[in-house]
Image (cartoon, rainbow, N blue to C red):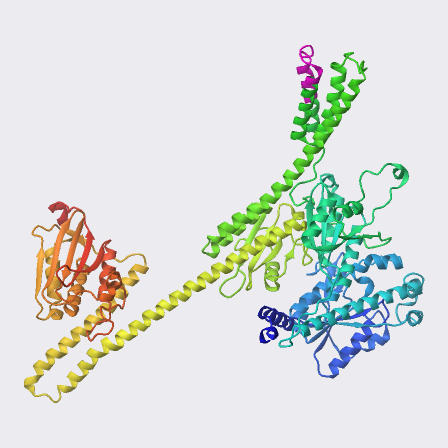
Amino acid sequence: MNDVLRPDPDALLAQLRSDEARAQRGKLRIYFGASAGVGKTWAMLSAAQRERAAGGDVLIGVVETHGRSETAALLAGLEALPQREIAYRGRTLAEFDLDAALARKPAVLLVDELAHTNAPGSRHAKRWQDVQELLSAGIEVWSALNVQHLESLNGTVGAITGVRVHETVPDTVLDEADEVVLVDVTPDELTARLAAGKVYLPQQAERAAQNFFRKGNLIALREIALRRTAEHVEDDVRGWRVEQSGAVGSGRDLQAWNTSGAILACVGPHEGAAQTVRTAARLAGQLNVRWHAAYVETPRLQRLAATERDRILAVLKLAEELGAATAVLTGSDVAEQLAEQARRLNCATLVLGRSQPEAGWRRWWPAKAVPLARALALRAPALDIMEVAPAESSRRLSRAPLQGASIDSDDHEKAPIHWPGYAWATATSVALTLVCTPLANVLELSNIVMLFLLGVVGVAMRFGRGPSALAALLNVAAFDYFFVPPRLSFAVSDVQYVLTFAIMLGVGLLVGQLTAGLRFAAGVSTSRERRARSLFELTRELSAALESSQVVALGTAAVRGHFGGDALVLVTDAADQLVMPADAPDGFDAQVADWAFRHGQSAGLATATLAAQPWHYVPLRAPMRVRGVLALSPAQPRWLLIPEQAQQLDTLARQIAIALERVHYVEVAQQAVVEMESERLRNALLGAISHDVRTPLTALIALAESLQTLPPEAHAEAGRAIVAQAHELHALVSNLLDMARLESGIAGGAVNLRRDWQSVEEVVGSAIRAARTSLGGTVVQTALDPELPLVEFDAVLIERVLVNLLENATKYGAPPIVVGARAEPGALVLTVRDHGPGLPAALLGHEQKLFDKFTRGEAESATPGVGLGLAICKAVVSAHGGEIAAENARDGGAEFTVTLPRREPPEPAEAQL
């Protein structure tokens, strides 16, 4: 029973993240009405006055009173933000100051006219985009909106009122609003207010009453506004029920709302495609389902004019703004591609534009193909198909201002008429005629027909559909004129040749059509393979990148290779600030890049934010945070409007961001390891000093104090003890200083060695004398080859190595200690052996650990030392290019072996020099 009541951890985590994001984002309240004059601004200002009276921080960003005295009276006492002046075509326009509002950051900000279009040069093209940035900054915004300004209702309202509304707001803005306040009046009351001059000035009111403000229009708009508000309330109720159903410990499962499934809007090249998209968006909103939009690119549609391709791109962008996931499909059969897309996306409803009947003489012409709706019904009988009537009046979508790419997912341009192909088709026909003329008396006419068909196939493969059709026609004519009796005449003696001509022409045209389709499919496959290969290569190379600079170089090269033009990958520094390039290319704007980084949104070219910029800026959003910005100036700007290319860019940016985050955490992990190792060494050093340095210091203090009480004859013995303790302390401090000096030299690149040709016997003897204090009465024996050559090394450092080895043998071994030296080809071998218990059992097989810093033969021992003697030996020997090793001797004891590289000594005269 407890398992049933236990909530889903993933759902709880997602809910917590959603609540956190919602808490950081400002709230949006929209005063919604059927038309102008219902009192939206008046209701908003009245609420603002109540909020101010309650002690709230209320600021007016922009409010349009339209000369209404009752509305203007409500401005009294409310703080207003000064508007920003923008010069445009010799005039000065007053616009809402977004930056000032962000700097002021009030609790509540009033921004009227949500559908307003900003003046050119503003950060955003639309005021609703300004509101989105304000909400992201955590500011609560109150605004007003009329129903005719909703994008999905643009065509419907235009058909009802006969008035085109050019300023629209995506439906998602209203859907995502936290509060929707419906401001409603009856049509009769609104008409009375219009006549009283409370809506427009007298001259405007008279025109409005004759056009937009007709009673039938107002009734219809009121119904739409009421329904749209009811849909929003329904969404709120549904969201509340979902939260309650999944409440912690409620013991109730999530109640499902059965819907008809997702919607697929089929975008075509016709004028009514925008209305199809708007209807699909509205239907998806009513059913609360996800929806998609797809356009099928066929070989025939690939040859559309640039203006028609621009219109299709605009419709696809409209669908994205309305919340759809868009895609461009490729294939020769539109119905088959749409049916497959619907099955893949699990869409239950297809929304199509209604085909228009042919006008004029075309209505009597036989239909060229099965209607799309019928073809879809045959291929997907389980799908619901909805046809949308074209709108009589709607806002014409602005065509894409960018130039340079076709609508399909590749970089194909619309091919101009390929005149060389037609010339080659003509030349091929002439050449075949010349070749076959001498063979006319040798070959059968059927074989000559095959040669002409072969020529058509060759032209089709090389030059496509048009030249192959011309070649087919020319070959039929040439075959008839030059080879069919009577020759040199188009007359036909045998009627059967007419069938031959028809077959030749049909086969030629069919081969050309099939070859063109194959060329188109090959081009699409090549573009897809190119996109997949670029992603694969980038992923493979990024997986091996270990530094941010490598990720930047690889990402920049990948983006440039795919999109052409110029590209920059900007990363952050230690202070989490975007690092700008020292030598910025032409057109690059550092402020736009920083805005995209701080807000986590795309900006610049082909976006709704600062669209006049020549560069496109994409934030590098990783799973944890934004890691930088990808700036792109593509070779063909219109590629950014093609859904597949936009998705490719987002995928590339995502891969770069993930790689940057991975490298960042690798660096964090390495830094953590270094800090842990430093902490370990620090603790080891402090532990060693606290024990081994404190002991001789304590002894020195005790001996010094005892001098005051000892008799004079005992002072000499106490002095010798003091000297012994001072030597021991000096040895400890010398080891620490030597290790620090050697580590500093190694870190700087190399230890500074003073190499000279030395006598090994002298260095061994001086080492034994230097270690005599530590050796005490320990017996030291030597086993040196009688004819040791001169060896080039640093005598002081090698002497230090031998001294440390002798002291180590004295501490942990037993006498006698044997120091040996022998010459081998290319090496000098020094050994120091004792006859004690040998190496500890814990180190057998891991003898090299003895040479690590602060490592002692016995973890707990009364023997003084900090564990640096052998580490110093290893550092010195490594600096000479040699090796040091430790092992147990065969007959007992431990033996340390130092192997130094050597070369043949010079001649005596050269050695003296």
Relative vertical location of residue 459 with respect to residue 448 in this rendering, above or below: below
The picture places residue 266, in percent across and down from the top left corner, at 75, 50
Is residue 107 found left or right of 42 in the rendered image? left
Q: Is 360 or 454 nearer to us in this picture?
A: 454
Question: Quadrant of residue 19 in the image?
Answer: bottom right
In which quadrant will I find the N terminus?
bottom right
Q: Quadrant of residue 109?
A: bottom right
Q: Is residue 495 visible?
A: yes
Q: Secondary structure of the magenta portion, mostly?
A: helix
The vertical placement of 908 against 461, above or below, is below
Outermost residue toward the front in this view: 1
Question: Residue 421: x, y in percent?
Answer: 68, 28
Compared across the picture, whether 706 is left or right of 201 comes to left
Q: Give the image quarter of residue 873.
A: bottom left
Q: In the visual, does 497 lie left or right of 807?
A: right
Residue 37 x %, y % = 86, 69
Residue 871 seen in the figure: no
The boundaries of the magenta stretch are: 427-447
